[in-house]
Image (tube, rainbow, N blue to C red):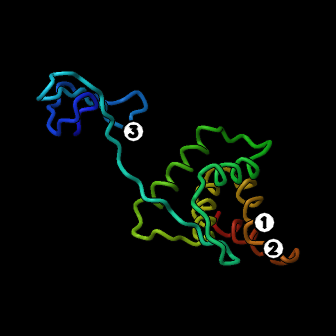
């Protein structure tokens, strides 16, 4: 680590602890040349996830879009924001852990539906109706019948 004061390349770690956000480590360092101290932060480098839309367009993954879609589906339903945020965290972790850097939006939609179904069936059906783009009442009823058969 290069010293910000004298530019010397060597330093030693004097203190190390988790930063306030718990996603990085704060390190106090001391330059081996000028003995001045400075702070560095170490974080895990996360590679961007590219979402391939139905029309072939590509954009970076935005967890807020997933959360907003789930919030819309859960509107006026007894699902708490912390539960939804935990589900989005879980989805994002699955995507980060996959070896794929590009993921189809359909796969993200399926992950969302897997998490909504046990939370609230009405929210699940709302999300599925938009996500699966039901063309008529028969395709909508087929989805409802699948839910009823599983009970």
- Residue drawn at (30%, 28%), measured in percent from left and top? 39
Which badge, 1 or 2, comes first in the chain's sequence?
1
Category of crowding for the residue at label 1, using alpha-carbon neighbours closer than 10 angstroms: few (below 14), some (14–19), many (at least 20): some
Which quadrant is home to the C terminus? bottom right
Which badge, 2 or 3, comes first in the chain's sequence?
3
Residue 28 image label = none
Q: For mark 3, what is the residue?
A: 23
Residue 129 image label = 1
Q: For mark 2, what is the residue?
A: 134
- Residue drawn at (58%, 72%), measured in percent from left and top? 104
Element marked by disc 2: loop
Q: Position of residue 95 (x, y in %)?
A: 48, 61
For the residues labelled 1 and 2, say whether their Cβ atoms are less than 8 Å apart: yes
- Residue drawn at (58%, 70%), measured in percent from left and top? 107
Q: Nearer the viewer, mark 3 or mark 1?
A: 3
Q: Nearer the viewer, mark 2 or mark 3?
A: 3
Classify residue 55 as left or right of residue 76. Answer: left
Q: Nearer the viewer, residue 20 or 116?
A: 20
Q: Nearer the viewer, residue 90 or 59?
A: 59
Which quadrant is home to the N terminus? top left
Q: Position of residue 30 (x, y in %)?
A: 18, 26
Element marked by disc 3: loop
């Amino acid at each position: 680590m290069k010293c910000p004061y004298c530019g010397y390349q060597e330093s030693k770690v004097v203190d190390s602890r988790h930063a306030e956000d718990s996603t990085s480590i704060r390190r106090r360092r001391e330059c081996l040349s000028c003995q001045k101290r400075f702070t560095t932060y170490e974080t895990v480098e996360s590679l961007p996830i590219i979402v391939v839309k139905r029309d072939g367009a590509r954009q970076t993954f935005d967890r807020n879009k997933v959360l907003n879609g789930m919030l819309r589906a859960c509107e006026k339903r007894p699902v708490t924001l912390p539960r939804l945020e935990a589900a989005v965290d879980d989805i994002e972790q699955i995507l980060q852990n996959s070896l794929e850097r590009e993921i189809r939006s359909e796969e993200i939609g399926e992950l969302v539906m897997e998490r909504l179904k046990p939370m609230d069936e009405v929210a699940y059906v709302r999300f599925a109706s938009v996500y699966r783009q039901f063309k008529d009442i028969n395709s909508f009823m087929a989805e409802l019948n699948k839910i009823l058969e599983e009970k």
